[in-house]
Image: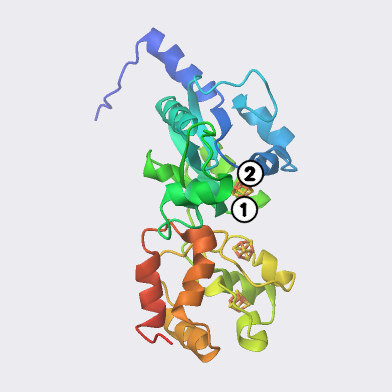
Amino acid sequence: MTMKTTIIPEDQKIEIKEEIKRKPTIGVYALTSCYGCQLKIATVSKIIEIADSVDIESFYMLSSASSMHKKVDIAFVEGSVSTKKDLEELLEIRKNSKTLVGVGACALQGGVQSWNHGDKNYKDLFENVYGKSKIEISEAIEAKPIEEYVKVDFRLPGCPPEEEEIIYFISTFLFGSWPEEKDYPVCQECRFAGNICLLIEKNEPCLGSITTAGCNARCISYNVPCIGCRGPVPNDVAWFDSLAKVFVEKGFTEEYIRERMKIFGSHHPKLEELLTKVFGGEKK
Ligand code: SF4
Ligand code: SF4
Ligand code: SF4
């Protein structure tokens, strides 16, 4: 039996070799934000080793040579779109990146700056804060998550994201793979951490049951109830029925839980569906 071999032309061989050898290029960008996510990435303990394995083309916090016009393999974008300039920059970043990762609550859920989404029109909100003066703040627009404008390939949640998740994301890209996003709630990690349940045992309005895991129940471990910074957990996971009973039993109304969820999750497309599923019409 003869084996069929494919002969690769010499010039292509070099191209393939260079493609394999080439380090992935990375950009880290910020729209309207507190810069906390960038700071978190910059201070990851293994950042020096990571920086050795990638070419960081842009990182505004660290280098004035950064530019959103440079082509990159992976763009990490923090911040919400809150000005027309943000939007222009985001479109440019998307155009120049093969893979775009939304980083943090501002980018993924609009952040606390979009808390009032759906409650009041933007003009009224703006006037409440800045009065009726004619000032224009960088042509401000209603704060929205980046996914409202561009395709987001991967979501790295948190306010800011956890160090080990940042390392996990970058490592998977380096291995030519991709990160898996969590679809289970904070409660699961909270149980593993051995915390007492603040909801059941202390009657505190902890949102862990309906918030996406990944922080190892950070706040609860410090005796502070979860306020949902990682965004609502995707639907169709277990827990809803039992937790609905607990929220209702503890006297937390659907409206109250909605208000807490909206601090970080007002733009979640399935927020209402999730609340209906949790409360099942048992409004108080
Ligand atoms: S998600 Fe949190 S830490 Fe990140 S930029 Fe927004 S407010 Fe800052
Ligand atoms: S409700 Fe809060 S305190 Fe209770 S298990 Fe879930 S995350 Fe932990
Ligand atoms: S416990 Fe809740 S609020 Fe605290 S970091 Fe985790 S998801 Fe965010």
* Labels 2 and 1: the sequence-earlier one: 2
Residue at the spot of label 1? 159
Identified at 48% across, 60% down, the residue is: 265
- Mark 2 crowdedness (10 Å alpha carbons): few <14, some 14-19, many ≥20: many
Q: Quadrant of the N terminus?
A: top left
Instruction: Name the amino acid type tagged 2.
Output: Cys
Q: Secondary structure at mark 2?
A: helix
Residue closer to the observer: 71 or 174: 71
Q: Which mark is residue 37?
A: 2
Q: Secondary structure at mark 1?
A: loop
In this picture, is 130 found above or below 31? below
Does mark 2 have its CB less than 8 Å from ligand 1? yes
Report ligand 3 position as a quadrant: bottom right
Left or right, residue 90 beside residue 158:
left
Q: Is residue 283 visible?
A: yes
In this picture, is 255 found above or below 9? below
| Residue 161 image position (x, y, % from top left) | 62, 51
Residue sitting at the far left: 1
- Mark 1 crowdedness (10 Å alpha carbons): few <14, some 14-19, many ≥20: many
| Residue 267 image position (x, y, % from top left) | 42, 56
Identified at 55% across, 72% down, the residue is: 207
Give the quarter of the image for residue 21: top right
In this picture, is 177 found above or below 13? below
